[in-house]
Image (cartoon, rainbow, N blue to C red):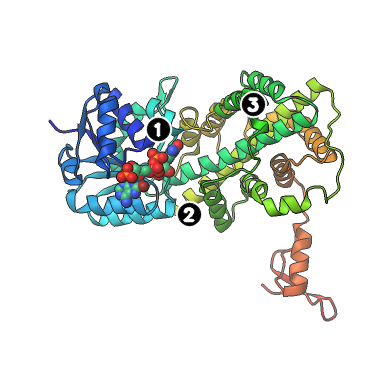
């Protein structure tokens, strides 16, 4: 009696994924390098479903029906390769190896190519939703061959989160497409959290307490900002520290850490030449918060206005809500554009409407807004999300509030790098003319880098060091 699917790597994510599969009636083979973890899973949750535990990798592989479907849930990087090395000689043509870890999409491309040479399918799969998602239904972003999805997809769709009966799992495209989409998901998550943090900062600068801001976020979660992170913000801000009686947020060290997927998103964008300014700003904001030496050197040394925002409270709350919505839209626009560009570069044919659709539930960035984004991409061919009819109108309606928040925060010396960067991008792409023309003039002056003209086709250079006449170079 063979198992339908196997999971190797039974730390928190792997265990919960295996339990999720078993709860849905699948016979699940389970394996972990250190057998004690397999035994612990069986002791604590073995009765929840039909598990087939194995101590050795060989027994684990032998316990699976063909084509074998094996989900690897180990620490990303060298551990993933160690598991793959062990599996390859034990597998047979047509077997499917799924990497559910947070791998870099370029590593996934290499692994896919390597396994393909062995006649095996390698499915780099983004899984979002943390440990609760893995157990109760994550958002799942598989890449790899389309053929492998025919066998694997129905299982993954069953255990994924669902919205209106639709699974939050779909084939993203070949080789690294799934991990790419997951990477950008995490980048957007950085931006979302930065905006939320800025909203909190602005509201406290206007005199609201953490508990009051918590109430504001709880209220926001019933409207257009309805999302998992806004819901969590209300919870975190309401938490009172048992030691001091203060809001917990006020006793947490104000240095944000990161594991690296946000950085990857930005690095990739830089290499592809995609303006991902808002997500980059969010990554840099975390780094800046952690620059202790610089912050200590500057605190009390650099002058600025008193941190006090004088605004009518309800008006400010309404304005910040709108700044948050508008900024979030820009982060999505930039992130989705990065996916579209990569899809072009790597020939993945990723469907952006589908990406937004499978992010609607299960994952960390799940939000009401994603339904609207998905519908807009399904209905229109969009050069950018910003010009989708309902989004364009939403931005038009909110931009005065957005500008007021940034102006007010800036005047009070409250840093809002995320909001400002988002608005700057909005104003950049809608501009009639950009000062990039001057940049081109300067480049031509010091480096003879040439320029194009608005009125005549061709490439031109001004003889700056001579008589400043213009020559056509192409
Ligand atoms: P960890 O990332 O903490 O990895 C622990 C697992 O890796 C254990 O099963 C461990 O086996 C195994 N492992 C290691 Br370490 N080196 C190994 C090797 N050389 N050979 C075989 N197995 C090895 O687990 P996690 O937090 O459950 O995350 C798993 C994956 O899911 C990661 O890639 C992570 O980035 C990704 N992810 C995590 C989350 C989350 O919320 N935590 C969300 C989404 C994705 P051992 O028991 O023998 O040490």
Pick the residue in front: 70 or 275: 70
Of pointers 2 and 1, the one earlier in the residue sequence: 1
Q: Position of residue 101 (x, y in %)?
A: 39, 43
Q: Nearer the viewer, residue 58 or 373?
A: 58
Of the numbered discs in the image, which one, if any, rests on residue 345?
Answer: 2
Query: Distance of mark 3 from mark 1, alpha carbons?
Result: 32 Å
Residue at (19, 48) in percent of width and height: 91
Q: How many marks?
A: 3
**Of the numbered discs in the image, which one, if any, rests on residue 237?**
3
**Label 2 Cα crowd, 10 Å radius (few <14 / some 14-19 / many 20+):** few
Q: Judge the density around disc 3: few (<14), some (14-19), many (≥20) Cα neighbours within 10 Å.
A: many
Name the quarter where the C terminus is drawn.
bottom right
Q: Position of residue 120 (x, y in %)?
A: 24, 50
- Whether ligand 1 has any atom under 8 Å from the Cβ at mark 1 is answered as no
Q: Is residue 327 left or right of residue 302?
A: left
Q: Is residue 462 above or below residue 38?
A: below
Looking at marks 2 and 3 on the same chain, the residue that comes earlier in the sequence is marked by 3
Q: Circle 1 — which element?
A: loop
Q: Which mark is residue 121?
A: none
Q: Residue at x 59, y 38 (%)?
A: 332
The answer to whether residue 67 is visible is: no
Location of residue 192 by image quarter: top right
In this rendering, the label closer to the viewer, 2 or 3: 3
Is disc 2 placed on a helix, strand or loop? helix
Point 12% across, 30% down: residue: 1
Residue 301 relative to residue 269: left or right: right
Residue corresponding to mark 1:
169
């Amino acid at each position: 009696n063979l198992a339908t699917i196997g999971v190797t790597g039974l730390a928190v994510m792997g265990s919960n994924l295996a339990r999720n599969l078993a709860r849905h009636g699948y016979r699940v083979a389970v394996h972990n390098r250190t057998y004690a973890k397999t035994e612990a899973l069986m002791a604590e949750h073995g009765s929840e479903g039909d598990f087939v535990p194995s101590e050795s990798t060989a027994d684990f592989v032998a316990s699976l029906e063909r084509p074998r479907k094996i989900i690897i849930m180990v620490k990303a990087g060298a551990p993933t390769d160690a598991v793959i090395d062990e599996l390859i000689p034990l597998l047979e043509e047509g077997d499917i190896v799924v990497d559910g870890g947070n791998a870099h999409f370029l590593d996934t491309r290499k692994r896919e190519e390597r396994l393909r040479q062995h006649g095996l399918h390698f499915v780099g799969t983004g899984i979002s939703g943390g440990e609760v998602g893995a157990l109760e239904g994550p958002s799942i972003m598989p890449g790899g061959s389309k053929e492998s999805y025919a066998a694997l997809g129905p299982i993954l769709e069953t255990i994924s989160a669902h919205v209106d009966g639709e699974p939050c799992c779909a084939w993203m495209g070949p080789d690294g497409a799934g991990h790419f989409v997951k990477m950008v998901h995490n980048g957007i998550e950085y931006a979302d959290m930065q905006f939320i943090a800025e909203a909190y900062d602005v509201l406290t600068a206007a005199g609201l307490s953490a508990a009051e801001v918590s109430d504001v976020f709880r209220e926001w979660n019933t409207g257009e900002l309805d999302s998992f992170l806004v819901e969590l913000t209300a919870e975190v801000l309401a938490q009172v520290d048992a030691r001091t009686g203060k809001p917990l947020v006020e006793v947490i060290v104000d240095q944000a850490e990161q594991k690296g997927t946000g950085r990857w998103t930005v690095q990739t964008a830089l290499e592809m030449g995609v303006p991902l300014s808002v997500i980059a700003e969010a990554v840099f904001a975390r780094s800046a918060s952690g620059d202790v030496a610089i912050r200590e050197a500057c605190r009390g040394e650099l002058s600025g206005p008193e941190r006090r925002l004088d605004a009518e409270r309800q008006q400010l709350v309404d304005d910040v809500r709108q700044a948050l919505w508008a900024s979030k839209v820009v982060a999505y626009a930039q992130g989705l554009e990065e996916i579209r560009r990569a899809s072009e570069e790597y020939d993945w044919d990723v469907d952006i409407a589908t990406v937004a659709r499978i992010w609607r539930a299960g994952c960390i960035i799940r939000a009401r807004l994603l339904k609207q984004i998905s519908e807009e991409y399904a209905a229109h061919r969009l050069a950018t999300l910003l010009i989708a009819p309902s989004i364009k109108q939403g931005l038009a309606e909110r931009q005065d509030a957005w500008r007021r928040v940034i102006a007010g925060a800036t005047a009070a010396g409250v840093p809002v790098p995320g909001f400002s960067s988002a608005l700057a991008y909005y104003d950049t792409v809608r501009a009639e003319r950009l000062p990039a023309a001057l940049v081109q003039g300067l480049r031509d002056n010091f480096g003879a880098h040439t320029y194009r003209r608005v009125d005549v086709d061709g490439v031109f250079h001004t003889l700056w060091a001579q008589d400043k006449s213009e020559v056509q170079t192409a």
